Amino acid sequence: MQSVETPHRSVGIDVRSIVKRFDTVTAVDGVSLDVQPGEFLALLGPSGSGKTTILMAIAGFEYPDSGSIIVGGEDVTWQPPNKRNLGMVFQKYTLFPHMSVLENIAFPFKMRGVGRAEREERARAALSTVRLDGFGDRKPAQLSGGQQQRVAIARAIAYKPRVLLMDEPLSALDKNLREEMQVETKHLQREIGVTVVFVTHDQTEALTMADRVAVLDHGRLQQIGSPHDLYEMPQTAFVAGFVGETNFCRGLARDAAGAREHVTVTLDSGPIVEATAMQAVAAGSRVRLAVRPERIALANAENATLTARVTDAIYAGNATRLILEAPGGLQLRLRLPVGGERVAPRLGELVGLRWQAEDARVFGDAP
């Protein structure tokens, strides 16, 4: 992609302890975030987690009940949206169907009183940035979904906003196009250097695109970190379960352990297993153990941590997903790579399972 003539001026964002209530519902409960200049931050969480409310507060479409929002060192908490110089890309691209692509991109300049020659020049530069040279005379209906998404981005970046805010802009695309646009959007962001805050409920999308991910649940920040840190070192059971696929088992800690220390756990189903505590746990306390399907290995009976019976096997191209039932009704999922030397076990077969202590995470059990 070609760059627009003048680079974007990257700025940071500092969200400080914001609270937002709607009647009796607290949508955002004391969330603080820092976004570095030029960073791509994803706000990830289920519906009702507060991610869109935070984005709307940054944009100026919602005002917090308390807390503050600093953009580029300037307190914008109470500024109207048109004073913040922020670009916005919505889930619905809101392109004007009667206007050409170029007119759609130039429209914000027209509203700002910019002359026709200058606004067309800047609109064409933005079109070039998103690799749509030659599409300026087309109407939105003549474009594919991916091309319309690029036009929406071009319109948002044309006037070089300090920050680009994106509210699930890829959710309307089919799977293959969505994956392609995830990569293209990330490449574009890196090239122009603009700071991005991106809302999504799709964990794969967040891990693919973001430099860091902020995971939210019920209006509270659960964890913020790199995709690797969230997947490999989740700080709460919610993060472990929401980011990636995870098996959960309940049990009792046999000894006390501090954060990042090994702990021995007696599972409710009977087996005694080793794991790594993510939080301090007391001896005899109730805990939840989490282990990823790809971290569980098939084992011989003498080396197995526990045994389970295969109840289903699902072929998924690069892996076979095994559904297993251990004693006590414990359900487990195991991902077995296709092409290995070991043949996938048959339905009904009793198999041994094991994992390394550093691959299982232990959290305090919720009351």
Image: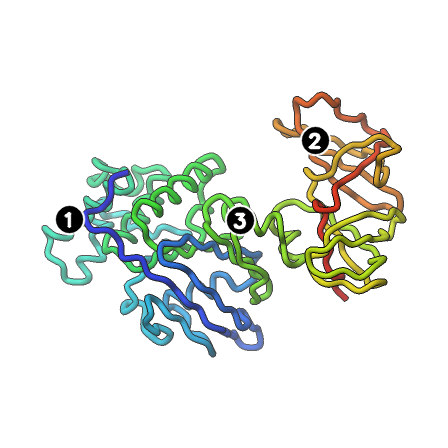
| Left or right: 235 as drawn, with respect to 356 | left
Residue where numbered disc 1 is placed: 120
| Disc assigned to residue 231 | none
Whichever of callouts 2 and 1 sits on the residue coming sooner in the sequence is 1
> For numbered disc 1, what is the local secondary structure?
helix
| Left or right: 301 as drawn, with respect to 167 | right
Residue where numbered disc 3 is placed: 227
Q: Work out how far the residue at label 2 is from the one at label 1, CA to CA, in angstroms.
A: 55 Å
* Residue 41 coordinates in the image, percent (x, y): 45, 55
Q: As shown in the figure, which amino acid type bears the numbered disc 1?
A: Glu
Whichever of callouts 2 and 3 sits on the residue coming sooner in the sequence is 3
- Kindly report which numbered mark, 2 or 1, lies closer to the viewer in this rendering: 2
Q: Residue at x 59, y 62 (%)?
A: 222
* Residue 276 coordinates in the image, percent (x, y): 73, 52
Q: Residue at x 73, y 37 (%)?
A: 334
> How many C-alpha atoms fall within 10 Å of the one at disc 2: few (<14), some, or many (≥20)?
many
